[in-house]
Amino acid sequence: MTESVEQWWRRRQWSTGRSVPYGIGAHRAAWSPYRALVEQFRPERNAGLLLSQIPPAADVWLIWVCALRHEFVATPAEQRARPGGASGARSWCPVCAAPSEAPPPGRRWPAAAEIAAVRDAPTLDPARADPRAASSGTRPSRPPRPRHVPAAHRAVPTVDVGRVPVGRAFRSARAPRATSAAEGRVRALLTERLAVDLTPNAVRVRTAFFERLEVWPDIVIPELALAIELDTIGRAGDEHIGRREAIDRRKDRLLREVGWEVIRLRVRPLAPLGPHDLVVPGISQRAAEKLVDRIGEARGELMVAAYRRA
């Protein structure tokens, strides 16, 4: 299993019984033909280790920086297998070779007719939504909801950001739909543990973010004025690092500026950005329990206890 460089180094210390499992220069001969990789490696971003201390076959995540300052995560084997000559620095950077699509630039926004259809859609009767309820003559049961939701934290059921007060959550037709299975998994695990409304997908902010007065966290909890972001390195190994990390930090600042708190659930090898961020090896029941505990730390245990499911 691929590990972060810190975990890998500790495991090698334990298995070899030495504080320095690989001395400086131990693997210099193996890396010397790959001049571009030597230039991209940053010891300060990799637990202070030098590239010559890392075997080329090590199954470890390393952080690299290309000549254009693109940061990305890759194993030694992935780096050495990239196409191109040893002296072609750009060919060794996945961001330069195939940049990821970074929303919102290039995204197709809904047409006016689509927004109107969402806004004017009639509310579906629960009995019609659940045929079993219609046949039995009873309304479908709903999970208990706390009664004391502060007015400032109630979600606004609208798609027009101009009508939303600053700092309020709402349902935006412009927000992209969830495309990650991991995001859906986190949402389901939270629903099992907290009786909160997860239908809002946007928060009205005071300062424009990519020319819009709204931001779209992965998960919005209006009852707690809390936004949850799920961060992974992505398939190309270039998500949520470098320039994208700066965008994440700005997004967090805009949310905190209007009274919201942000918790980033960051999958290794990503490091935390904020005071309440949680680093996990993957999405699991254990990670969900830690996330709920972290929500309690951020918003107060007594406050969160009112929304915990029995």
Image (cartoon, rainbow, N blue to C red):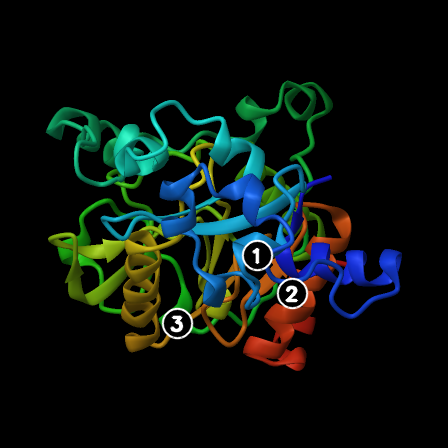
Work out which residue is located at the far front of the displayed protein and give it. 29
Q: Judge the density around disc 1: few (<14), some (14-19), many (≥20) Cα neighbours within 10 Å.
A: many
- As displayed, is residue 2 above or below residue 216? above
Q: Position of residue 121 (x, y in %)?
A: 30, 30
Q: Nearest to the eye among marks 2 and 3: give it.
A: 3
**Which residue position holds label 1?**
196
User: Would you say 55 lies left or right of 17 here?
Assistant: left
Q: Nearer the viewer, residue 137 or 254?
A: 254
Q: Nearer the viewer, residue 202 or 22?
A: 22
Secondary structure category for the residue under label 2:
loop
Image quadrant holding the C terminus, namely: bottom right
Q: Residue at x 45, y 68 (%)?
A: 273
Amino acid type at mark 3: Trp
- As displayed, is residue 94 above or below residue 162? above
Q: Does any portion of residue 75 appear in the rendered image?
A: no
User: Would you say 164 lies left or right of 183 here?
Assistant: left
Mark number, residue 260: 3
Q: Earlier in the sequence, mark 3 or mark 1?
A: 1
Q: Position of residue 268 (x, y in %)?
A: 60, 52
User: Would you say 172 lies left or right of 138 here?
Assistant: left
